[in-house]
Amino acid sequence: MSRIYNGFDKNGERWLLLVFYVMLVGTMFIEVVRREVFSYSSIWGEEIVRYSFIYLAWIGAASAVKQRGHIRIDVIMNYVPRTMKTLLYILGDVVMFVVAIIALYWSWEAVHVSWKFGSVTHGLRVPQYLFLFAVPFGFALVMFRLIQSFLRDLSDLRNGRDVYEGDTLFD
């Protein structure tokens, strides 16, 4: 079981991002060829691209939390001691976790209403909740990664290590 968990922990978002990205690009390519060569397009292609992009965004948000790659203003972090820097990261994670709980609750409400009333998409005619589920799924992944980040930061604080600040983009 730990091997499965470690595999998901290391590459879960990567594989999900790859699947949705390939689905997005492949469908977009097919639709462009259909439109330009055959002068025909379909509504289902547009829907697949739209919903793949939504899943990409939310799964990417969880990946950014894991790698501490989300946008932040960290100028102050260069001027505070190591302990304060770790505490600021923990505070940021706690605030983001509270926001994620609120967003998870309200996004799940939309999924529940769609399920309850049986709404379907216009082109694909599949249940709308499958696509609305992208938001609570993304926030659940974000919360999972925030818990991991919080535990890692507490461990760093206890052991006197520098806090993990993520990989830098331009070094």
Image (spheres, helix red, strand yellow):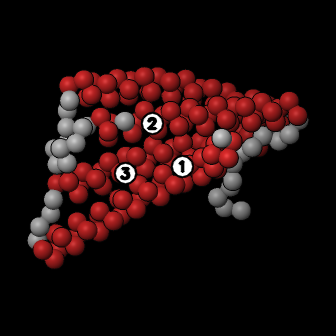
Residue 148, numbered label: none
- Residue sticking out furthest to the bottom: 37
Corner quadrant of residue 83: top right
**Identity of the residue drawn at 32% across and 39% down:** 130
**Identity of the residue drawn at 50% across and 33% down:** 140
Q: How far across and down, in percent of the image, does residue 37 sit?
A: 16, 77
**Identity of the residue drawn at 22% across and 73% down:** 33
Q: How far across and down, in percent of the image, does residue 65 sit?
A: 59, 42
Judge whether 163 appears above or below 147 on screen: below
Q: Amino acid at mark 3?
A: Phe
- Residue sticking out furthest to the right: 160
- Residue sticking out furthest to the front: 1
Residue assigned mark 2: 137
Residue 13, numbered label: 1
Q: Amino acid at mark 1?
A: Glu
CB within 8 Å, label 3 to label 2: no
Q: How far across and down, in percent of the image, does residue 49 sit?
A: 30, 55
User: In what quadrant of the picture does the C terminus appear?
Assistant: bottom right
152 left or right, relative to 32? right
Q: Measure the alpha-carbon separation of dots 2 and 1.
A: 12 Å
Q: Amino acid at mark 2?
A: Phe
Corner quadrant of residue 119: top left
**Identity of the residue drawn at 69% across and 31% down:** 150
Corner quadrant of residue 74: top right
Between discs 2 and 1, the one toward the N terminus: 1
Judge whether 39 appears above or below 99 on screen: below
The mark lying in front, picked from 1 and 3, is 1
Residue assigned mark 3: 53
